[in-house]
Amino acid sequence: MSQKFTVLFDLDGTLVNSAPDLMHAHNHVMKKYGFTERELTDVKKIAGRGAKRMLTKSVHEIAELTGKIKKTNEMVEEMTKEFLDYYSKNIANESTLKKGALNFLEWCKKNFITMAICTNKQEHLSIDLLKKMKIYNFFDYVAGGNTFDYNKPDPRHLTSTIEIIGGDIKKTIMIGDSEIDSESAKAANIPFILIEDGYTEKKISELHHEYLVKDFTGMEKIIEKYL
């Protein structure tokens, strides 16, 4: 029997508009440690690589501007723990599903398409967010940033997930919103659908993609081309 078609999804900024809750957790930590809080647009630019990288980048940028902050690994580790603790308790206060996402997930399920998450958010937080958004049961597997010994943009994050769910890399497509997603899909030789207004510092023109969409409205038409 031939393998089913597979759709891999990033989570933050792709399926879920999670930036408001990420911003609140980020700013809670920044304020606690005496740093400047950031705007939503700033947080969206640095949210794609996981909590520790996000906080490291924030502290580094503030240090460059002021010249007064000496960043230490120990401090960032403490800040990351504080972030994860706060965020885990406030993970879905203001987060919402991307427009058309639920309808698309239902369409995929109806058409026997296998679905999995590939995100740099920690696995337990990803599962919790998916459950709170009431879409967890759509997915055959959730690969978080700490599921393997590697994560995006390493293509193995995608290829290992495909292998685990019994998929075929030649019958797989990736949907994401950032350069991290784009780079991993390109390296894995998987077609990539880029969602606009992503959690990335780069311009759309700088990101490799086969298709560019605003949200999940009409996504079915793209997938049908591969079925």
Image (spheres, rainbow, N blue to C red):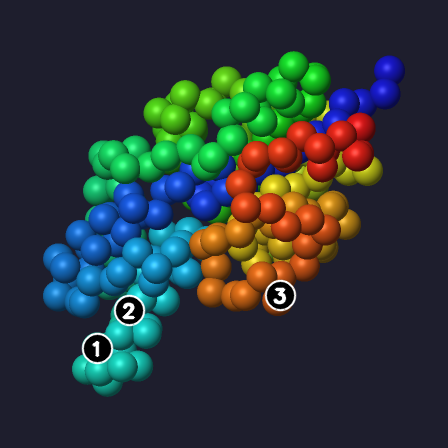
Asked if labels 3 and 2 touch by Cβ distance under 8 angstroms, the answer is: no
Residue 157 can be seen in this image: no
Q: Is residue 17 left or right of residue 210?
A: left
Nearer to us of marks 2 and 3 is 3
The image shows residue 85 at horizontal and vertical percentages of 24, 41
Identify the residue at the far right of this view: 1
The amino acid marked with disc number 2 is: Val
Measuring from the top left, give residue 204's x and y in whole percent.
58, 61
Q: Earlier in the sequence, mark 2 or mark 3?
A: 2
Question: Which residue is under mark 2?
Answer: 59
Residue at the extreme front: 218
The residue drawn where x is 39% and y is 56% is: 44
Are the residues tagged 1 and 2 within 8 Å (C-beta)?
A: yes
Q: Considering depth in this image, is 24 or 108 the residue closer to the camera?
A: 108
Which residue in the rendered view is the most extreme toward the bottom? 67
How many tags in the picture?
3
- The label nearer to you, 3 versus 1, is 3
Image-quadrant location for residue 129: top left
Residue located 62% across and 27% down the image = 115
User: Can you say whether 110 is above or below 198 in the image?
Assistant: above
Q: How busy is the neighbourhood of tag 2: few (under 14 within 10 Å), some, or many (20 plus)? A: many
Q: Amino acid at mark 1?
A: Ile
Q: What residue is disc 1 on?
A: 69
Q: Is 194 displayed left or right of 45 in the figure?
A: right
Q: Quarter of the image containing the N terminus?
A: top right
Residue underneath mark 3: 205
Q: Residue at coordinates 28% horizontally, 69% vertically from top-left?
A: 59
